[in-house]
Image: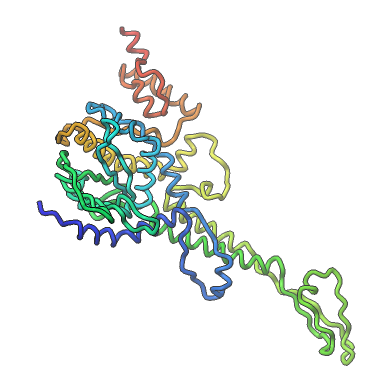
Amino acid sequence: MTLRGIGYLRRKLATVQPRVNMRYKQYSMTNHDTPVGITIPFNIRSQYRSVLGWCAKGVDSLADRLVFREFANDNFEVNKIFRDNNPDVFFDSVVLSALIGSCCFVYISKSDEGDSPRLQVIEASQATGIINPITGLLTEGYAVLASDEYNRPTLEAYFTPTKTYYIPKDGKPYSTVNPTGHPLLVPVIHRPDAVRPFGRSRITRAGMYYQKYAKRTLERADITAEFYSWPQKYIVGLDPDAEPLETWKATVSSLLVISASEETKSNPTVGQFTTASMSPFTEQLRTAAAGFAGETGLTLDDLGFVSDNPSSVEAIKASHENLRLAGRKAQRSLGSGLLNVAYLAACLRDEFAYLRSQFVRTEPKWEPLFEADASGLTLIGDGVIKLNQAIPGLIDSEVVRDLTGIKGNPNAKPAEVIDNE
């Protein structure tokens, strides 16, 4: 196997870094879109720049539902490795980074304090590599482990199957031995495919377009609201020799005295221009929200357009069917990456290159995407009773936990099994 080298990986990272950084700006609502329009001057539009968090909502609505539980059939005690690495923060950081940047990377290193290796999450703009499409592991990798306040790398790492090379900015490069047989940089990818092996971001181009469209609508509505609040007025037939009216006084005064023209003896006509209606902007904003909701699997309720609230969890599931399918897909793809992390962490802990096929029975377990309420628990309970009556012992406490998220008593047995005993 021929390695490409650190120079190639640096250039590769430089090509994808702007796109990842742009999506992080979209998520943090700091991205400034290029002004588009033919009627409003740039200096006026810049005073009414709008901020909208739909892209962040699209990511968080899925990330908050992806809660990793544990690894089942843990024959290699990998759950302990993750418990020693602050799992509440680690798993949430992995999921969020992968949804924003299409993937993230986990850097595995030996710990000086305990037996469990250290796990560090690195965002997609700071790491890259050459991926094996069969295993999902890297054949070689590169990552920026530390940067200064100007985002310039101060510590870089180059990962190979046998060694990890460290390149500090103000020091001498050094290396450590890698006993696992794989680079200690593992990608965790969201929705990979044959064309995009490093996955696809939750912040899609269509989602960014609908958000930009909604932001332009809000800016136009905000500028129009100024004229809507203070409509323009006019006077026809005013004496040319009359004292000019101050514009502010004419706007806020409750009583204006306007003399008739001495030449024509006609009274001036005072009028008001018709103000623009705000209704078209509301409809435009709702259209943009409908497009964004369809792109991300959300509903208009999620984006702030209140309608009749669903009465049960089942109704919420029905309205979020596309979101549920996206969550199940994310669980499968992210779970595969987390299993690769567990595999290499176990190899590094034991300093032994296990076969990857030995981890096929280890299974990532996730909490249910939608928690069951009282009515849902009743329906599940009735179904469990009927299934266990038809096939005794078919549904146990582990299956019920997967359906409801309630741990309960792990030693509990179905009623039919207890009766038979």
Residue furthest bottom as drawn: 263
Colour logic: rainbow
- Which corner quadrant of the image does residue 323 belong to? top left
The residue positioned 79% from the left and 69% from the top of the image is 252
How far across and down, in percent of the image, does residue 195 sit?
Answer: 24, 55
Quadrant of image for the C terminus = top left
Of residues 323 and 169, the one drawn nearer to the viewer in this rendering: 169
Residue furthest front as drawn: 171
Of residues 29 and 410, the one drawn nearer to the viewer in this rendering: 29
How far across and down, in percent of the image, does residue 314 sit?
Answer: 47, 35
Look at the picture and state if 265 lies above or below 394: below
Left or right of 94? Residue 287 is right
How far across and down, in percent of the image, does residue 144 sit?
Answer: 29, 52
Residue 87 visible at all: yes
Look at the picture and state if 310 lies above or below 289: above
Left or right of 267? Residue 44 is left
The residue positioned 83% from the left and 82% from the top of the image is 268
How far across and down, in percent of the image, does residue 27 sit?
Answer: 44, 53
Left or right of 105? Residue 55 is right
The residue positioned 15% from the left and 57% from the top of the image is 4
- Count the labels in the image: 0
Residue 128 visible at all: no
The residue positioned 42% from the left and 48% from the top of the image is 59
